[in-house]
Image (cartoon, rainbow, N blue to C red):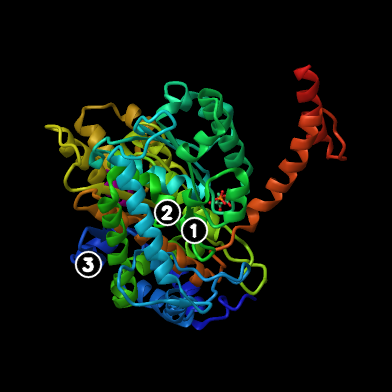
Amino acid sequence: MNSRESLTSWQKLVNHSAEMKNQHMNDLFKENKHRFDDFSIKLPSMLLDYSKNLLTEETITLLLDFAKECQLELWREKMFSGDKINSTEERSVLHTLLRDRSEEPFILDKQNIKQDITNALNKMKAFTDCVRQGKWQGYSGKRITDVVNIGVGGSNLGPQMVTEALKQYSDNSVNVHYVSNVDGTQIANVLRPLNPEKVLFIVSSKTFTTTETMTNAQTAMKWLVAASFDSSAISKHFVAVSANKTNALEFGIAAENIFDMWDWVGGRFSLWSAIGLPIALDLGFDKFIELLEGAYEIDQHFQKAELNENAPVILALISVWNCTFLGAKSQAILPYDQSLHMLSAYLQQAEMESNGKSVSWDGDDISYPTVPSIWGELGINGQHAFYQYLHQSNNVIPADFIGSIQSATPVQGHHETLMANFFAQTQALMQGVDEEQVRADLCAKGRSEEYIDNVAPHKVHQGNRPSNSILMKRISPKSLGSLIALYEHKIFVQGILLKICSFDQWGVELGKGLANKIQQELVNSEINVEHDSSTQGLIGYYMKSLF
Ligand code: F6P
């Protein structure tokens, strides 16, 4: 038995979950008129309402006991103080330090890494000011108008999600584009309308080994050199962000154009570092700092608030409650704010790459369900696509609803419609509608008894479907920083509760290795490895059809 399952609190939660499965949230709301006050947390930039979950005071008490038995507070301390909690990669986990703007030094492996961060931020500021003010010139002396970020996973999703979310804060000094896919269609489409004289490429790769990114960067370099007839143009049009300086130099990036990154920042937690360069170029350095400040606010809250009032802790406990104890397998992220249209894609990597694992940090098999699969879409679009499933399928899918009190771009009459749907959907998922009510409604409409018998079962909604509601005051650089940090810490806490090493990603390596071998076969047009018959057949069919 994994040691989590042998904890007293775990056993109590197992027993309690058996009782709670027979409860309906409608009754819980009737029994406790203060549920909203009891189960919500107000933060400076947002409100978290978690009352529409199948839980009571007792549930929260048991979950908090569980967190304490898992020594959550000790692990939190370990993370912030730089212990090498990424044990399989023997690394510290210090993305939080990137947003700590205090003067205090931070010594890691005998080095003051706070100074490294300050230097990196200063370099970012000087560079972004230079580009945005038109002082950085391309090979023909023209100012930069377009920035193309080449990177994938953590070197793409965070910056792109933030760029999309904060579009209304951009002064359009430069246009920012993203290329992540090795499918040539993407880079071809991005480059087609651009003028090579005015384009700046950021090659963003922590390892500087990622095949997709390297392939796209090579294509971009060829495109530039073909237009400029001069390889010295590269230093005017290419910068890199990487922890692997050697590879970046070898690739042809000028030493002074390399922005540092460090192995104590995980790729999916890296938008706060120079990986966030496209954000700073788009919005200006000051707004990038506001993003960091918003995250820092949540770092402080996470470190200082009591566990029962600690938003990331509560979100993580609810996730574990819903998934591990009540059996949910999937989690929907449903933004009711257009600017957050990439949030679910971002959180997919953040949560699934971190905690989608089935071995504990001791190397034991985990027998209990861990984290759900994360998916989602803008709520309104989802309502007209997959909400049918959320309301009436026999899979219960907990959902996070995220909306803003003030629209970033107010258009008369829109915001009320948007938010009415937000509130109504969480209510409908929770309350449902029983057969008695369905029959009464149909009867009131004058429907025949035969029709009612026929249709009533199809109109019943069981309800009792859990959701969290996050109401942002408004999406701004600062509040967005807070929202991202909220989820980052939730993910960390989930890992501790489930005994998962959240900061490695070995599960992406096997496929990468096989792809490298198969790529050689495709390039050489010969299969030289014995594959299973399906893979062999597919490669063979592909090759035959090519020629
Ligand atoms: O393949 C997964 C991954 O390693 C992610 O963890 C990472 O964010 C992404 O690839 C990109 O890695 P890099 O920044 O080293 O190119």
Quickly name the residue at label 1. Answer: 261
Is residue 534 toward the left or the right of residue 432 in the image? right
For the question of whether residue 256 can be seen, the reply is: yes
Q: Residue at x 33, y 71 (%)?
A: 302
Foreground tag (3 vs 1): 1
| Label 3 – label 1 distance at C-alpha | 50 Å
- Can you tell which mark lies on residue 32? 3
Question: Which quadrant: the N terminus?
Answer: bottom right
The residue under label 2 is which amino acid type? Ala
**Rendered view: 19 above or below 219:** below
Q: Position of residue 471 (x, y in %)?
A: 23, 53
Residue 321 vs residue 68, the one in the foreground:
68
Quickly name the residue at label 2. Answer: 274
The magenta stretch is 425-431
Q: Main secondary structure of the magenta part?
A: helix
Q: Position of residue 179 (x, y in %)?
A: 49, 35
Residue contact at pointers 3 and 1, CB within 8 angstroms: no
Q: Which structural element holds mark 2?
A: helix
**Rendered view: 287 above or below 500:** above
The residue under label 1 is which amino acid type? Met
The residue under label 3 is which amino acid type? Asn
Residue 45 vs residue 80, the one in the foreground:
80
Q: Residue at x 60, y 35 (%)?
A: 218
**Which numbered disc, 3 or 1, marks the residue that appears first in the sequence?**
3
